[in-house]
Every structure is written in C-alpha cells, then in structure tokens.
Amino acid sequence: MQSYGAPPAGPPGGYGAAPAGGGTPSALKVQGRAGRHWQINGDYEPLGQMHNDRPVWVSRAVQPMYIFHTGKTRWVISKRMDDGSKCYGFKQDTGNTPDPATCKGPWVCCDEHGEWAADANVSCVTAVAANDMFSKLRLTLDGELQKLGINDNTSLKTLWKRLDYNGNNIVSLAEIDKLVVEKTDGGSWPAWLNNKPALMRAYKKTLAQSDKGGQDGWIRKGDFHALMLNIFWFNRLYQIFDNMDGDDRRMDVNEFVRGMVQLGLNMSPQDANAEFGKIDSNHGGQVLFVEFCAYVRKRVNPDANPNFDADIVSGEKCGQVVRKGHGHKATHTHYVSKKCLRDFDAAEGKIKALMQDRQQLKDLWSHMDFNGNGIISLAEIDKCVVEKFPLLNHKPALMRAYKATINASDSNGDDWVQRKEFKRLLGNLFYFNKAYWIFENQDGDKDRRMDFPEFKNCLTLVAGSAGMKDAEMKADFDKVDRNGGGIILFDEFCRYFTQKACPQCLQDLVD
C-alpha cells in the first residue's frame, strides 16, 4: 500500500449518509486494475457505517479493503479506514459526489516503480447488493471489533504493543495464540473466539494477504487489523461448521443439508448434493473445515484470486510457492532444503544427547526462560524452535507437542511448561514433528487426510512395523479410524505414531 502524501485542502466533507434521493447506498464494483495492487478489483458492499460523514463500502472478501472519502477531496481504496494518506488507489472528488461511481475523472494507482499515474482501465460502477447470508456475515465483522473496542487506531496500537512485547515489529503464531487464550479466559473477548483450527486459518490467510508476502511466517504491524478481522471471520465460520459436523471434525452431505436448513438456506436434495460436491473436491464423501472455508470464500467473492484458498505448505514445497507468487528474488536468500528421514535420525541422536547432558539442558532452558520465572509459554517455545531447531518447525506439530506436554497426567494442568516437564517437551517436539513429516510425505493428494494405502506407506517408515501383514495394518488403521470413515487426520495419526514408534530409551530419559 502506497503513501501519496497529505491530500490538498478542499471543501469540508459535510455530506450525508444516503445517496441523492435518499435510500441505502448501492453496492460498488471495481474492475480493470492489472499488475500492482490488482486486489482492488472486486465487489464492495455498503458497510452501514459513516466515515467523515460519508458512506463506506467494504470488499466482500475478508481481505480488508474499504472505499471511503478522506473528508477533503478524494475517494480512496485502502485496507484501513483512516485519513487516506496510504492507499491502493484514489479518485479526485471536486463536486461533493455521493459515491465514487458518480465521480468523474480517472482512478490514480501506483505502478511497479512506485510512481502514481492515472489508470484509464480502472472503473467503479454501481452493482446489486449481495443477498448471500455469508456475505451479510462478513459485513458484521467490523461492528463486532468495534463493540470490543479493537477497531480504532489507538486500541489496535495498544493491543499490538501487548502482543509485540519485545518491540521487534513481528509476532509469531504462538504469540497470537497466547493473546487469544488470555483475552478469552479473562472474559475480555467471547469464548467462541478461541478455536485452534480457526486461529490457524486466520494466521495463514493473513500471511497470504500480506503486502510483504508472508513467506517468513511472521505477522507484521501493518497486517494486524487484517489478522483481527480474520480471527473473527474464521471463528464465525468454525461455529457454523462445528454445529453442522457433529463431533468428528468432518462433515458429510446429510450434516451439510441439515446445517444449511438451520441457516435458513433450504435446498432441494438435488441442489444440496450439487452444492456439497463443490466442497468435496476429492469425492470422498466428507469435507474438512478448510474446505468449508474455501467454499464460503467462493460464495462471498467468486472472482477473487483462488490462490488464497491454497494452504501454506512447508518443507521443500514452500520455496516453490513463494517463488511462484513473488518471483525468484523472494527466496534467493531463503533456500529451503528437502528434508529426509536421515535428517530426523540424526536429530534424534542429538536430542537424546541433549537430554542426557544436564549442562546443555540447563543452558537451553535458560535460553527459553529468558525472564527467569521458571515457566515457558507456547510463544517462547515457538521462538526457540525457529531459532535453534529449524527441522522441527512445523506449527501443527508444535501445537500438538505443547498440548501433549501440558496435558500429561503428572502435569499441574496450567498453560505453562514447567522446568520438570522440559524433557517431555523436547521428546514431544521431536516425535510429533517426525510424525508430521511422515504424514505430509505419504499424504499423496495433499488433502490432509490419510486413507489406508497412504497409511500402509507410512508404516514402512515407522520403527516397530517391519514384517507387519496387510491384515495387521488394516486392523491398526481401523483402530485409528474410530468413526469408520476410511480416512484419518493428523491428530489421529499422531496418537498412533507415538504409541507405535516412541522408543523406550527416549521414554526412559523423559521419565
């Protein structure tokens, strides 16, 4: 987003909320922008709020994008409602126009060289307002943030300072999770905002939408408002999905139909099956939360970049994704080497040696518990893993290892890892990351679900599985696949893997 300096002085923006003739402002459609800041293209709905005594429009996509008046002489498109000093594009308003669609003159945008110039291809026209319930749900997000006092600049700055406690202008997923837990546990935020699948989705989407590309995994100050919107949006969707799918984190067509009826979207059986088929791309008969999110995105903003639905991938694939989206320069100093089982075998030896060396353990604990309070948080663990154990830097595995440590039978049940739990944490970090790597590599179609053939392939890499017959493997698979759906998820595989492959020698060290 570019800054074009303070707009020239002009008449005060004393314009009313309604367009000429009264009534609710129409929706707007921006189109024609190519190249830099192409993301301004799309449909914008009336937000129902005023800014500088003028109506505001918000993009149907959750990616923050607003059309508003600066209160002086410009209509602008920006990711924040502020003074318009930074924006993606603007149009000069010399006639006190009710909206940018009736305002004459070209849109001015910034090119790849940082130069502002009129773009005759960009247009803004009136459009029909959306009647889709998910689009309407998007329009409630800003109001919900406003109710909690976290949608204005001052409140956002205060909250950011609390999150970015060391002042380095970047925060991790773990730090965000810690903030959400503290706010919901303390009652400042509603409890429905604390759902890990929704938080993970919000984090990944914010990275994908970031002006900086998000390839390093850090959320920056300029993306904080987008992060908050995404946290609210995906938790709202998670509420809907959770009410539909029962208790197994998968949704079948019958659950989908019942859920749509509850939302007021009555469909014929034929229409419901056709709609469900749009979500169930692999025709497995069940869909996950991430697939449901992609379906909603297509309903709300069908013309948006479909890459926003692609999951952030790890390991050897991430460099390809970053380069494809941002060019080779984005990764020329961030080469990601391909991981192999030999790397994990070597890491296992190092972890064992570390756990047997009291001085190394003490030094590592001191590094993580830098404030010396005798406990370490998820954020501190995440920071240490990123810095010292890049092989083990998989966020789903980190979350699983952390939860397994603090929920152990002899743990005190709080959200902090104590010094006496440190060995168990290190063991969990290693084995859950190894499990994640095996799961990802054998999940051939990358749908984050494993069927029986993929499960069999996994067992060739799991210690203690040599010589197993197909019938034994199938019996193990059925034990993991508790609902008999024919697929298992990462958490389910983790439980199996750690029981099957965690060497007793490491367990002895932990104990």
Image (cartoon, helix red, strand yellow):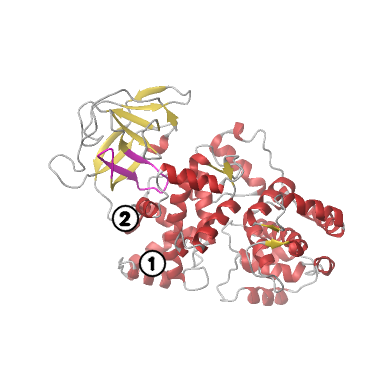
Give the mark nearer the N terminus: 2 vs 1: 2
Q: SS at mark 2?
A: helix
Q: Relative to 115, say whether 453 is above or below.
A: below
Q: Is residue 474 above or below residue 169?
A: below
In the image, what residue type sits under mark 2? Answer: Lys
Q: Is residue 328 left or right of residue 69?
A: right
Q: Is residue 264 left or right of residue 387?
A: left
Q: Which mark is residue 120?
A: none
Residue 377's image quarter? bottom right
Q: Where, quadrant-wise, is the C terminus in this rendering? A: bottom right
Is label 2 in contact with label 1 (beta carbons under 8 Å)?
A: no
Residue sitting nearer the eye, 280 or 205: 205
Quadrant placement of the N terminus: top left
| Residue 79 is one of the magenta-drawn residues | no
Q: Above or below — where is 398 with respect to 34?
A: below
In this picture, which residue range is highlighted in magenta?
Answer: 50-67
Residue beneath the point at 44% across and 46% down: 155
Which numbered mark, 2 or 1, is in the foreground of this view? 2
Whether residue 477 is visible to the viewer of this picture, yes or no, is yes
- How far across and how far down the image is residue 56, in percent? 29, 42
SS for tag 1? Answer: helix
- Front residue of 404 and 298: 404
Query: Which dot marks residue 136?
Result: 2
Seen from the viewer's position, the closer of residues 272 and 216 is 216
Crowding near the residue tagged with mark 2, few <14, some 14–19, many ≥20 C-alpha atoms within 10 Å: some
Q: Which of 354/459 is in front?
A: 354
The residue where tag 1 is placed is: 273
Q: Residues within 10 Å of mark 1 (few under 14, many from 20)?
A: some
Q: Is residue 63 magenta?
A: yes
x and y percentages locating residue 386 in the rendered image: 69, 47
The quadrant holding residue 275 is bottom left
Question: Is residue 307 at least partly visible in the picture?
Answer: no
